[in-house]
Image (tube, rainbow, N blue to C red):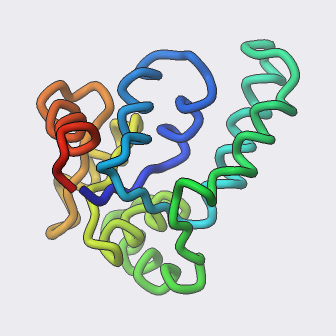
Amino acid sequence: MKVTVDASVAVKWFIAENHHDQARILLGPGIRRYSPDLLLAEGANAIWKKAHRGEIGSPHSFVEGFVTLPRVIHLQTSDMLLRDAVAIAMHTGHPVYDSLYIACARLTDSVLVTADRMLARIVSDRVPGVDAIMLDDPTGMARLEEAAFGGTA
C-alpha cells in the first residue's frame, strides 16, 4: 500500500508520544512511503519546538534520525509539487506547506496519513480523489496494519 506521511506522523516515529505505535505501523514492509522534501525541515522544526518547550532533551539524536529518513521514504521534490499545492491551497484556503502533502498524495496515488485533524478534514471535504487517514482512526489504521504486515501491498 502507498501512503504519504506528513511531519506529524514522522515525528512520532522518533518520539514516544500519543499515537506513536500507530505511526510506527507505517514503517512495516508492506507500506511504500512518500512525502514532500519539506518533511525534513518541518519535522526538524517540530523537534526543535519540543526541545525548546522542554518536552524532550537534546534534539540532536532526533534530528539525526530525520537525516536518515530518505532511506525509508521516497521524498518528492517541492518543485514537482508546488503548482498543484498552490492550486490546492487556493481551492481549500489551507496553507501551501500542508497542501504539498496533499499534492504528494495525489501525484503518487497514495493515501495521506496524518495526526493533523484539520488537514484530514480539508482532504475529506475539499479534495476529491485523495483519501486521508488519521492516526486515531481505528478502522483506517487496521487497514494500514494489514497492508504493512499482512502481506498485501
Is residue 9 toward the left or the right of residue 43 in the image? left
Q: Position of residue 130 (x, y in %)?
A: 21, 64
Is residue 45 toward the left or the right of residue 124 in the image? right
- Position of the N terminus, as image quadrant, is bottom left
Query: Which residue is rendered at x = 40% and y = 82% of the image?
Result: 84
How many numbered circles does the render carry?
0
Is residue 61 toward the left or the right of residue 43 in the image? right
Q: Position of residue 49 (x, y in %)?
A: 75, 30
Query: Which residue is rendered at x = 53% and y = 16% of the image?
Result: 17
Query: Which residue is rendered at x = 75% and y = 51% of the image?
Result: 67
Q: Position of residue 3 (x, y in %)?
A: 33, 55
Q: Position of residue 97 (x, y in %)?
A: 55, 62
Instruction: Work out whether 123 lies above or below 151.
Output: below
Where, by quadrant of the figure, is residue 19 drawn?
top left
Where, by quadrant of the figure, is residue 32 drawn?
bottom left
User: In front here: 149 or 83?
Assistant: 149
Instruction: Work out whether 7 lies above or below 99.
Output: above
User: In front here: 54 or 145?
Assistant: 145
* In the image, farthest residue toward the front: 151
Where, by quadrant of the figure, is residue 153 drawn?
bottom left
Is residue 145 toward the left or the right of residue 7 in the image? left
Query: Which residue is rendered at x = 72% and y = 40% of the image?
Result: 65
